[in-house]
């Protein structure tokens, strides 16, 4: 299909987003930007968070990984389900009780200012790296399939995408994102279903015969029982639990939308509903991955990994499917990028600058600084995407999980220590503990063959990181002499 035609559809989709942003951003203020005026509809938030939770990496990398890891990712998904219930019934009541705008304010109330700033700083680092890795993957696909043929270089493609995101999030923030994420999730899931239906129809398969064919090729294996393997089911399930607790329950981007719902009970409905929908959706992505490899073998397609789905959708399928794929891919891109930029802006303004504590700043000054931070965050995104372009890792989902293991571990340790103990810490030493833990994990990961032989550490590195942080906090703590949160 002509790149110009695809580009016109992308432009039309963006104009639709602009219309939604204009409607929802009217009469917006700092409160609506940061927390949606505490008036978001829980059903819209739950549906829209599907897109944020999955992203373009899930859209491309999860199906692509089936060739090497079969359906092993579903082991992590089982852990996700357990993790979402912990978020809903342990963390959310705490956040609502304290009426938080930034969830890291909990660390300030419970442990101290240095702990609070450290938690927020690790979130900013983690979300910046994770979101730009996701953004890079989708931008690269868009550039390779559309804009490169029109003579547009990668850096300009990235800049255009970021400007598009800035335009529709600049005023409304969370208030706008709740609606745009819902729209984008709808397009993404439509693309997923259409691609599955097309391949089933083309190969004259139904769900049962497709699963049988996948099983014959070894694609449909879910549970792995070798304790030494990174794919061992116990490791994967526990990793899934802690990934969800940290990357959803202790992540300002995800919680910013969730606590924008007025009532705790509705917010909990949002999280529980999201958890069950995600099981179905990710299961469908894995099923699609198996179908793609079956289809590729039939058609003589040699692509694999992250390149498999784009190559088949854009070069082996009819034009209408290619158009749906591109729109779905962009719909997977925007929720992870727009929410991240907004959440990072919020966290920096509230947690690092302390905007809400500046009694001498009027609304106009706060808005001006918030907009400046918003633009700065977008510029930083541009730099990191270009950095990932230079590195060019073949599987971005592994990069993202590795980044999460190193950067969310200290956040996991801080929140866990605060919630399950009543001890107070030497607050000024907390940053050193939170830096030491991931450094130790880095050396453990690098030399794990020498340390553990055939035993492999995978995504559970996040748990080790959190445990080391917790132990460090325990060492620098003492029995509290005052009542804590």
Image (cartoon, rainbow, N blue to C red):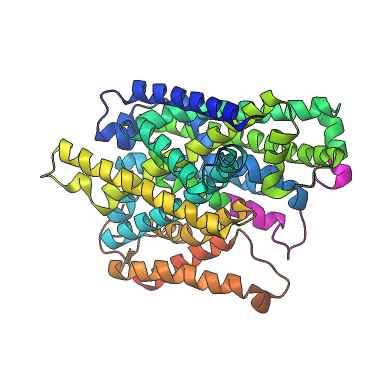
Q: Is residue 228 left or right of residue 419?
A: right
Give the answer, above or below, for where 363 lies relative to 400: above
Give the answer, above or below, for where 35 lies relative to 235: above
Whole-percent x and y of residue 170? Answer: 33, 35
Instruction: Return the residue nearer the eye: 483 or 308.
Output: 308
Q: Residue furthest bottom?
A: 450
Q: Is residue 222 left or right of residue 35?
A: right
Q: Residue at x 35, y 23 (%)?
A: 22
Whole-percent x and y of residue 8? Answer: 53, 26
Q: Is residue 18 left or right of residue 481?
A: right
Give the answer, above or below, for where 151 lies relative to 421: above
Q: Residue at x 81, y 24 (%)?
A: 201
Where residue 29 sits, quadrant-wise, is: top left
Residue stretch rendered in magenta on the structure: 214-240
Whole-percent x and y of residue 136? Answer: 53, 48
Where residue 171 sits, quadrant-wise, is: top left
Q: Is residue 84 visible?
A: yes
Q: How many numbered marks are there? A: 0
Whole-percent x and y of residue 125? Answer: 41, 56
Instruction: Return the residue nearer the eye: 319 or 71.
Output: 319
Q: Is residue 246 visible?
A: no
Q: Residue furthest left?
A: 360
Rendered-image quadrant of the N terminus = top right
Q: Residue at x 63, y 27 (%)?
A: 323
218 drawn magenta: yes
Instruction: Return the residue nearer the eye: 286 or 433.
Output: 286
Give the answer, above or below, for where 232 lies relative to 101: below
């Amino acid at each position: 299909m002509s790149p110009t035609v695809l580009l016109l559809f992308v432009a039309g989709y963006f104009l639709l987003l602009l219309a939604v942003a204009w409607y929802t951003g009217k009469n917006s203020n700092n409160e609506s930007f940061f927390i949606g005026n505490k008036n978001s509809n829980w059903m819209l938030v739950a549906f829209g968070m599907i897109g944020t939770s999955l992203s373009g990496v899930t859209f491309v990398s999860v199906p692509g990984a089936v060739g090497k890891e079969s359906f092993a990712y579903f082991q992590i998904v089982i852990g996700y389900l357990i993790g979402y219930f912990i978020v809903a019934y342990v963390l959310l009541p705490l956040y609502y009780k304290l009426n938080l705008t930034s969830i890291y304010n909990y660390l300030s109330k419970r442990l101290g200012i240095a702990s609070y700033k450290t938690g927020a700083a690790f979130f900013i680092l983690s979300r910046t790296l994770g979101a730009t890795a996701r953004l890079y993957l989708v931008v690269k696909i868009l550039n390779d399939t559309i804009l490169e043929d029109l003579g547009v270089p990668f850096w300009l493609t990235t800049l255009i995408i970021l400007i598009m995101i800035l335009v529709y999030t600049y005023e409304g923030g969370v208030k706008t994102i709740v609606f745009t994420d819902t729209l984008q999730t709808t397009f993404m899931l439509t693309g997923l279903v259409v691609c599955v239906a097309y391949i089933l129809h083309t190969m004259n398969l139904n769900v049962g015969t497709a699963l049988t064919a996948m099983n014959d090729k070894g694609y449909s294996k879910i549970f792995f029982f070798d304790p030494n393997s990174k794919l061992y089911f116990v490791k994967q399930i526990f990793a899934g639990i802690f990934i969800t607790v940290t990357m959803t329950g202790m992540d300002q981007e995800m919680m910013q939308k969730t606590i924008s719902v007025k009532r705790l009970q509705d917010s909990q409905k949002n999280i529980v509903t999201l958890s069950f929908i995600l099981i179905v959706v990710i299961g469908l992505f894995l099923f699609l991955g198996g179908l793609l490899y079956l289809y590729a073998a039939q058609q003589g397609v040699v692509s694999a990994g992250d390149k498999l789905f784009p190559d088949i959708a854009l070069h082996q399928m009819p034009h209408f499917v290619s158009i749906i794929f591109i729109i779905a891919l962009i719909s997977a891109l925007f929720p992870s990028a727009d929410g991240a930029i907004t959440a990072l802006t919020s966290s920096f303004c509230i947690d690092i600058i302390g905007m809400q504590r500046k009694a001498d700043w009027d609304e106009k000054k706060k808005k001006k600084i918030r907009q400046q931070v918003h633009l700065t965050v977008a510029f930083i995104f541009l730099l990191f995407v270009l950095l990932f372009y230079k590195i060019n890792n073949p599987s971005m989902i592994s990069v993202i999980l590795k980044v999460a293991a190193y950067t969310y571990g200290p956040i996991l340790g801080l929140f866990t220590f605060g919630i399950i103990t009543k001890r107070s810490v030497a607050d000024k030493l907390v940053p050193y503990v939170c830096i030491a833990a991931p450094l130790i994990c880095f050396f453990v990961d690098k030399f794990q063959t020498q340390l553990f032989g055939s035993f492999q550490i995978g995504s559970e590195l996040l748990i080790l990181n959190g445990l080391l942080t917790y132990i460090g906090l325990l060492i620098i703590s003492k029995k509290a002499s005052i009542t804590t949160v």
